[in-house]
Structures are given as C-alpha cells and as structure tokens.
Image: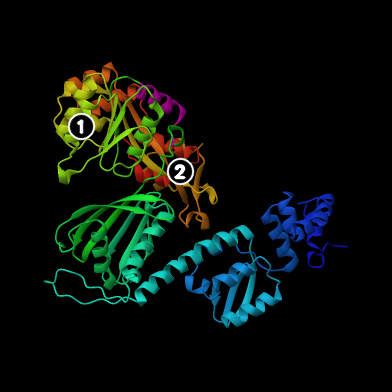
Amino acid sequence: MSFNPQFSKIGEILVHKGYASEEQVKEALIKQNNFGLKIGDTMIKLGYIQEKQLLECLHEQLEIPIVSEENLMDINEEIVALIPEPFAVENRCMAFALEGETLFVAMTEPEDIVVIDDLKKLSGKNIQTALIGDNLLTNAMEKYYKSIRTTSQVEDAVGNFEFVAVDEDEQEISIGTSKEADAPIVKLVNLIITEAIKANCTDIHIEPLTKHTRVRFRVDGALREAMNPPIQMHPGIISLIKVMSKLNIAERRLPQDGHISLKTSLKSVDVRVSIIPTVLGEKVVMRLLDKGDFGFTLNTLGFEEEKLAIFRKWIRRPYGIIIVSGPTGSGKSTTLHAAVKTIQDIETNIITVEDPVEYRLEGITQVETHEKIGLTFGAALRSVLRQDPDVLLIGEIRDEETADIAIKFSLTGHLVFTTLHANDAPSTITRMIDIGIKPYLVGSSLNLVMAQRLVRKICKHCVREYKPTQDEIQQAGLTLEQVANMQFKMGTGCVHCNNTGYSGRTGIFEMLEVNANIRHLIFEGANQDLIRDAALVNGMHTLHDAAVEKMEQGVTTIREVIKLTVFD
C-alpha cells in the first residue's frame, strides 16, 4: 500500500522522508506538552529537524503552498497594512499579495479556520492561505510593519502641518502649531534622526525634489530611500536643522557647516551638518558620529594575517609617520584609532588633534579643532607640541602647515599617525610633495603608507553561488584562466539585508613599506608610477589584489571589486 501524506500524521511523514527517526518522534510526543508546542515545533526545538523540513512535510500533508523569501522581497505596503499589526502578531500571519478580491496570507498555521474567518471580516476579501516558517515570518513582519509605522508617523506630522507662504524677500519661515512641543516639523526631524540611528546609518541626506522631499540613509556605504515628506515641509525642516546647528536661518544662498550634539534613548551621537543651496532649495547632509565607547580592534577591521603583522610592526616603532589614505568614509579614522588603542599604555602620552573627535578613547588626550575661534589644526598642533607627547594622531593633513608640523614632529623622535585623501599608496607620497613638503623630508619621515577602502560583505542569510558574465570578468581585470578555479558568490537579497544582498563592511588594504629603495626614489623626486613599480617588486599587494582576495574567500562580490578598485 502506497504512503499517502494527506492521511498521515506529521510525525509519520517526517519518518517516511527520513528526516527523523521513530524514537525521536516518540520523545517529541512525550515532551511537547512540557514545551506547549505542536509536535513539529517540538522536534525543531529539540534539534532533530530543521524548519524547512517541517514546512516541506506540512506542504505535502495539507497541500498548501510554501512562501519563500523571494515571495517577500518587494511587497506593496498597502497590501500588508490590510491586516492590522496587532492581529498579525497575535495570529502569526501576514498579507503578501492581492489578486482581484483574493488576499494571499502567509500563516504559520494556515488551517486555522477561526483566524481565516476573522481575516475575511477584517479585510473584506477572500482569503488564500500559504505556509511560512516562523523565523521568516518574524523577519518579514519586522521589516514591513516597521516601515508602515514610520510612514504613518510621517503622515501624522503632515496631517497637522500648517505653513505660511512667504515671498522671496521674507527672511524667516513661519510655522503655526497649537503646541510647540507637538510641532510636526519637530516630530518629523526627530523621526528621521531616530530611524537613522536604528538603521546604523552613517549619513542622512535630505534633498528637495520637484514634488516632495527625499530622505535617504547611507547604510553599509550605500544610500537607500527612507521617506518622502511633502515639499511644503522642506523649508521648515531646513530651518529647524539650522536652529539646532546654530547656523544663520536667514542665509539661504551660501553653503553653511554646523554641528549638533544629540542624546537619544538609543545612544549619544555627534552630528556634522552641511547645508548647500541647490536650484530646488537647500540640501542637508548630516554625518552621524557615535559618541559611545570605541568598539573596534585591529583584528576586527578585515586585515589578513600577513598585513596585520606588518601594520603591528610599524605602529610600535618609536618615530616616523604612518599615513592612511583614501576617500571620505573609507574607514581611515577607525583604523588609526584602533592602532592608537592597540599601543596605548601607561608609559606613553598619546594626543590626538581631530575635526571633529569621531571616537572617544579612554585615557587618551583628544583635542577638537574650532576654526571659528582660531583653534585650527596648525594652532592646536603648535600647542600640543608643548604637552610632551610621545605619539600624535592628526585627524587629517589638509595643508602645508599641518604637513610641515607632522614631518618635523616625526623627525624629532616621535610617532605620528595621520590621514590624507589620495587614490592609492604611491599617489599618497606624491600628494605630500604636491602640498609643498620637500622630497627629502617626505622620504626621511615616512615609515608606512596604507591605502584603504571598505567593501560590502555578502549577507550570510541569502548567499548563493554566482556565475559572473564575461563583461564582469573583464571589468574586474581577471582572465578566463584565473576565474576557472574561482568560486563566485552573491547575495540574492532577503529580509535580513533589506533586499540588498549585503550586510556589513570590511576593509581592504594596500601597504607600501618605505624601505631604502623607495626612500631613494622619493629623494630623487620619482613619480608615482616608478614608486608603485618598486613597491610591487618589494611585495606590495594593490587594493585590487586585496579586493579579489576577499572575493575568492567568499566575503564580497565581483561587483564590489569592479565598483571600488582599478587594475593596471
């Protein structure tokens, strides 16, 4: 007699498919009352089966389709909102599609007739159920209902918004509200900042478009849209941010830079504010800097063992300069703060001069520049030299004065850490000379130049094998022979990574150790190509090499290699 799953118990189906033994099912039957769970969930809790195996068996037993992660990628929030969040949470269900008058609902218990009847009354639709795993449902509900709540809060603020039209000559924005504390602009700005902090955002972009204001968050180095308040609110948003930053509320034609210190229920943050006029109005970019304890170490930044050993060697030298180069947001300051934290001890006086102080380090003297009152990098550094420092961290070399002080400090028996904006390690050296420092001083003082970038890591929840196109292989600077033995991976996108395929970032590094040969080239005024060739002979791995290595390890994708590095 053939086995029919529709007339079998779930335990019998699990045994028939080889997912569990009869002894395991018997044990689960005994323990399920203690757990207060069904037999299948009990076996998952005991570690005998996986959730996807239970779903497969339930699918065969009930003949109800299974909802996959792909089905939950891009759901219309209006469809999800047809089921109120409290009801969805209590009854473990979520709407994910609507076809005509039929609402498709993912349920952990799709045979629950009472819940299905309630869903019909709530939505006024015919209900078609589908099976979903509990973990996947939890993640999907968190993603979509959180977005719905945020949208609702924006709409609440908009609903109470009262604005006064002004002509071009009027200086102030007039906002009328019944209670200042409940002002919709205040609520909206608070919402933007709070949601940004929750998302671990590094930058907030608030920019005017023709019909609405676009708010975007930079998360893991990529911008994503967060919300779209109406364009009528834009002047009020800008004005409030100016007031918070102590900027000139009346000036709308010139760029302005300010600073806000915020303390939220989540954490304290420093916010660097940049406002620039555009043809549609003023745009704001806010950089969020965590004021909490510095939680990075050199081991968590992404160094390979060989490069970490080189970096550790040079940061423990008694004098000289170590420069980390790269564009804004490439993790330069994080790396240097981790280095300073590594060498910190009671016998060493370490002083930092930064604009602003991005991380608070216990036991280290940190000075923040303030150009409006004359405390520039140069002025701060001249004073710091009288503070008997052993190690000096300069936030950034911006001009000849700062570079000159750093060079002279390193040549008098001190160790200097600093950053510079340059494309790679060899061009960092020529950039120092371009600033105005004599080649013999640059060559005499430099110990190590390290270029750095941050690449996005593949989301571990949706990582899959990937076959790159011929065009991608060519753009990545790889040959067919090289890729023959490579395994490529890509994130398909899921609820864990907000459908991006990436989660988190890690560093890639290009280290140029300044030995006698490199020093001689610098003295002679060699260009960056000659310096690069010599460094490669000495064993330097380029940023492109480092990115390809991360790709081979399955940490990042070929698209990140193409996006962030160049090859010769």
Q: Residue at x 72, y 63 (%)?
A: 58
User: Which label number is shown at residue 436?
Assistant: none
Report the span colored magenta.
301-316
Q: Secondary structure at mark 2?
A: loop
Q: Residue at x 31, y 72 (%)?
A: 230
Could you tell me residue 458's position as x and y percent? 48, 47
State the residue in front, 48 or 231. Answer: 231
Which SS does the magenta portion mostly show? helix
Real-space CA distance between mark 1 and mark 2, rounded to the nearest whole angstrom: 40 Å
Q: Which quarter of the figure has residue 340?
A: top left
State the residue in front, 472 or 316. Answer: 316
Residue 264, visible in the rendered structure: yes
Q: Secondary structure at mark 1?
A: helix
Give the residue at mark 1: 381
Q: Residue at x 43, y 24 (%)?
A: 309
> Which quadrant does the N terminus fall into?
bottom right
Label 1 vs 2, first from the N-terminus? 1
State whether residue 385 is above or below residue 468.
above
Give the residue at mark 2: 556
